[in-house]
Each structure stands twice: as structure tokens, then as C-alpha cells.
Amino acid sequence: MSDLQASAPGRVNLIGEHTDYNGGFVLPMPIPQRTTVGLRRRSDGVVSVTSRELVGAARAYVLGTEAHDGSWLDYIKGCTAALRGAGHRIAGCDLTIQTDVPLGSGLSSSAALEVAVLRALRAANELELDDVALALLGQRAENELVGVPSGAMDQLASSLGAPCEALFIDLRSLAIQRVPLPPRLDVMVIGSEIKHALATGSYRIRRAECDEAARLLGVAQLRELGPGELDRVAGLPAPLDRRARHVITENERVLATVDALHRGDHAALGRIFAASHASMRDDFEITVPEIDELVALAVAQPEVIAARMTGGGFGGSIVVLAQGGNGPATAARIAAAYAVRTGLRAPALLAGRSA
Ligand code: GLA
């Protein structure tokens, strides 16, 4: 029996890819799938973790000895190390973790785990920690102990998201605006069966390229630059010119999407998502042929308004906006066409409004 339970959702990003660590704009929303943590207090300084989905057999470590071991336990060690690093006092505990967030599909199973664990530890240790600070500690866990230099979008979405609304986040100021979905709009997430491996270096290379582009352009972050500066960006050596162009134009597309959602302008949403996907494919070079195919098959469906890859890239999932009501049937038709073209399955990870 646990003393307490906490949980947190995965997320789907509607638009704003690889903009978060550049101080830019993103538009994620939580998905119904969650990670749940049961916590039982212990009087020693040991953290013991049991999870059928994540760590297999029970694993344990002593608080204060957290070190990277390349397993899922790193996400939990990262959370306790980040809390202690920020000056919070925490006691040992037994954690039981369950999740139905699909792993490695671009839906932030890692952020759901971090936020759920941090919520459980916040409650058990009565920590003074608001939801934004908690999300930033989750990002710190990921950056420092797991070793992935991600931005803060995923943890903020998991920590602050609410059903059926997207979060428009400015990663420079951390200002957050809630954007309700228009009525009769389905948000679908369809997997490609190509697993992404965020930690394998491609993500790190893209981030380093953005930092280098910002340095050469004389700004702290690419966020400082707007479309008026694209001529100057074109003078950068390749591929930094294309990387920076993606970030600058993607920030504009997030703003345009928020506007189109407010106005219920489906045609604009279709154009913006198509441009975002093309930019990820050609300028940021983070899509794979199967994902390009899946997007093409999705937009060929009459009820589909817009589709693009979502998440860090190199596989993962696509996000599809469609006229409401028939999500499962639409997703099934896209999956059937994808199976014919690629021989792969395209599981509908979400096939209706995001709860
Ligand atoms: C991953 C990272 C995020 C973000 C996205 C790309 O999900 O964890 O911080 O950079 O990729 O938009």
C-alpha cells in the first residue's frame, strides 16, 4: 500500500519544434495517457523503484549517490538529485510506477515520469514548489543526470496542461497562455513505428548548431531574431543558415497557429502545418521518409485539416487536426494506407480530442 499517489500526463506538441531551447514559442497540450507514481515513505535514505514497464526488477539507490547508469532509473535519480541540488530536503521512499504513455513515440514519456515523480516527492516531503519550478526541476533532471540537453517544453506541458486546451508558452519569459481548442476539432496522434532515440546525439547536434548560429549572428538565443533578419541568416555557413531559418520561421508559425485556432481558420492551419513539416524536413532535417509518407497520407483524407511531425524527430509520431467526430475511422484509414506503402503499423496513439 502506498502512502500517496501522484500522476502526470504525456504531451503532444501541436507546433513549435526545436524552438524551446532557443527561447522561442511552443504550443503543446497534454494527452490522456499518464504515468502514476505510488510513494511509500522509508526512514532510511534509500529510494527503491518498482515498475513493470520501465525498470523491470526493483532497483534501488541511496540519496546523494545518484549517478548516470543509462537506464530508466536515471530519470528518477535525476529528480532526486535536482531537488537536493535546489536545496530541498527529501527522505527515502519506495516508488511504484505505472505508465500507459507510449515510450519512444515523441509523446514525452520521460517528462510524464519526471513530473509524476516530482509531484509525489513534493507531496511526501511538503516541499514549497510551484508547478513551473517543478517543471524546471524535471528539465534539470533530464539535462544533468540523463544527459539530454532538452528544452523545458515537455515538463511545462506535463506540469501545467489541462484537458482540451493547448498551452502557448514563451520560453524566454515563461509566460503561458491557455488556448482552448475550437469546437468540433479532433487532435489525433499517429505513431510511425520508427523509434526515435533522443539521447543518441542528433538532438544534441541540432542544439549545438543553433547555439553556434546564434553566436555567429551576435545574439544570445535565436529567439532574438525575427523574419526581418532572414537575409542576414542566409549568409551563415551551411547548414547553420537552414537551422536558424527553421527556428525563426517556426516561431512565426506558432504565433500564426494561435491566431488561426482563435479564428477557427482551418485553411490557415493546413498551410501552417504543411510549412512546419517542410521546414523540419528540408531546413532542420529531422524527419525520416516514413514520417513524410505518413503526413502525406494523412492530409490526403478529406476530413483532415492539417498534419505534421510532432516531437524531437528522427521517427516518432505525427499530429493531425481533423473535422471532429470521426477520429478513430480517419486514423484507421491512414494506418491502412501506411501499411500498404511501408509494411509498418501506424498505431493511433490518440484519436479524438485530447482529454
Ligand atoms: C524533445 C525535447 C523538447 C523539444 C522537442 C522538440 O521533445 O524534450 O525539449 O526540444 O524535442 O520540439
Image (cartoon, grey):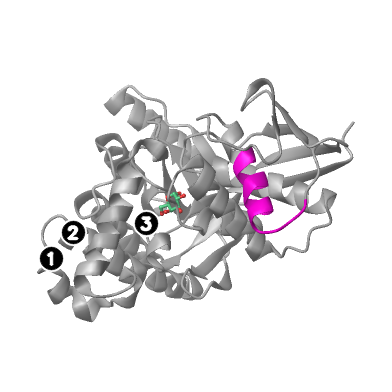
Q: Number of labelled discs?
A: 3
Residue type at mark 2 is Leu
Whole-percent x, y for residue 252 in the image: 33, 72
Q: CA distance from mark 3 to mark 1?
A: 19 Å
- Crowd around label 1: few <14 · some 14–19 · many ≥20 (10 Å): some
| Residue under the point 39% across and 29% down | 336
Q: Is residue 244 left or right of residue 122?
A: left
To which residue does mark 3 refer? 18
Is disc 3 placed on a helix, strand or loop?
loop
To which residue does mark 2 refer? 240
The yes-or-no answer for disc 2 within 8 Å of ligand 1 is: no
To which residue does mark 1 refer? 236
* Pick the front one: 263 or 347: 347
Name the disc covering residue 347, or none. Answer: none
Residue farthest front in this picture: 65
Question: Is residue 68 shown in magenta?
Answer: no
The yes-or-no answer for disc 3 within 8 Å of ligand 1 is: yes
- Crowd around label 3: few <14 · some 14–19 · many ≥20 (10 Å): many
Whole-percent x, y for residue 119 in the image: 74, 51
The yes-or-no answer for disc 1 within 8 Å of ligand 1 is: no
Q: CA distance from mark 1 to mark 2?
A: 6 Å
| Residue under the point 46% across and 34% down | 332
Q: Which quarter shows the N terminus?
A: top right
Q: Quadrant of residue 97?
A: top right
Q: Is residue 325 left or right of residue 281?
A: right
For discs 3 and 2, the disc positioned in front in the rendered view = 2
